[in-house]
Image (cartoon, rainbow, N blue to C red):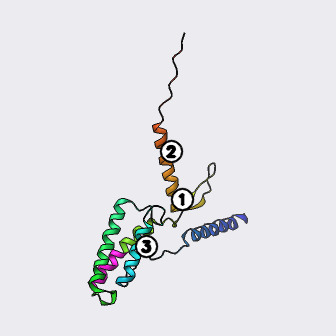
């Protein structure tokens, strides 16, 4: 009887430690517009990182269009005002909103982002936490898709008719 409360305490402590390990990483601001010159340099870097092999290579075509539209809007505001300090409040809000849209897309598609899930191993009901980078997940998805397409392209083997 004395073991039940102790065992329950260990289970709760393990669950709390597991939850803390899963949530313990910091998000960073990827695109921040302060002045015209720094922003132009940042835009070049973001566009380069959206190319194949870059940190944000998994940004799809629709998201890429959204990023480009918002970067252009931000550039337009900085061309007009020069710095954030010279903007009025409504312009600062617009700049902030455009910046948040870009950062949300880039953060979601960041190949270094760690994605953790709780998965029970085969034959067990006790879940384990498995963490992989977004790049690993996307490469596995892409490889599986390619394998599926290759399998569909292989003609079905047909038996030879017997001579006899």
Name the image quarter holding the N terminus.
bottom right
Residue 3 percent location from the top left of the image:
72, 64
Measured Cα–Cα span from mark 3 to mark 2 = 33 Å
The residue at 36%/71% (across/down) is 101
Going by the image, does 164 lie left or right of 43?
Answer: right
**Circle 1 is placed at which residue position?**
136
**Would you place residue 61 above or below residue 144 in this image?**
below
Q: Is residue 139 magenta?
A: no
Q: Which class describes the residues within 10 Å of circle 3: few (<14), some (14-19), or many (20+)? A: few
Among the two numbered marks 1 and 2 on one chain, the one whose residue lies closer to the N terminus? 1
Among the two numbered marks 3 and 2 on one chain, the one whose residue lies closer to the N terminus? 3
**Circle 2 is placed at which residue position?**
147
Please identify the residue farthest to the top as the structure is shown: 164
SS at circle 1: helix
Please identify the residue farthest to the right as the structure is shown: 2
The residue at 44%/75% (across/down) is 30
SS at circle 3: helix
**Circle 3 is placed at which residue position?**
45
In this rendering, the label closer to the viewer, 3 or 2: 3
């Amino acid at each position: 009887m004395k073991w039940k409360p102790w065992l329950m305490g260990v289970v709760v402590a393990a669950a709390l430690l597991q939850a803390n390990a899963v949530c313990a990483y910091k998000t960073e601001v990827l695109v921040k517009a302060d002045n015209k010159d720094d922003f132009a340099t940042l835009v070049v870097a973001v566009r380069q990182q959206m190319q194949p092999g870059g940190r944000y290579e998994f940004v799809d075509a629709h998201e890429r269009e959204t990023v480009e539209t918002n970067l252009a809007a931000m550039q337009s505001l900085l061309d007009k005002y020069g710095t954030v300090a010279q903007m009025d409040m409504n312009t600062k809000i617009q700049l902030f909103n455009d910046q948040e849209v870009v950062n949300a897309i880039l953060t979601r598609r960041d190949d270094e982002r760690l994605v953790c899930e709780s998965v029970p191993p085969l034959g067990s009901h006790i879940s384990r936490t498995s963490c992989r980078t977004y790049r690993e997940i996307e490469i596995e998805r892409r490889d599986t898709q390619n394998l599926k397409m290759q399998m569909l392209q292989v003609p079905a083997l047909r038996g030879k008719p017997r001579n006899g």
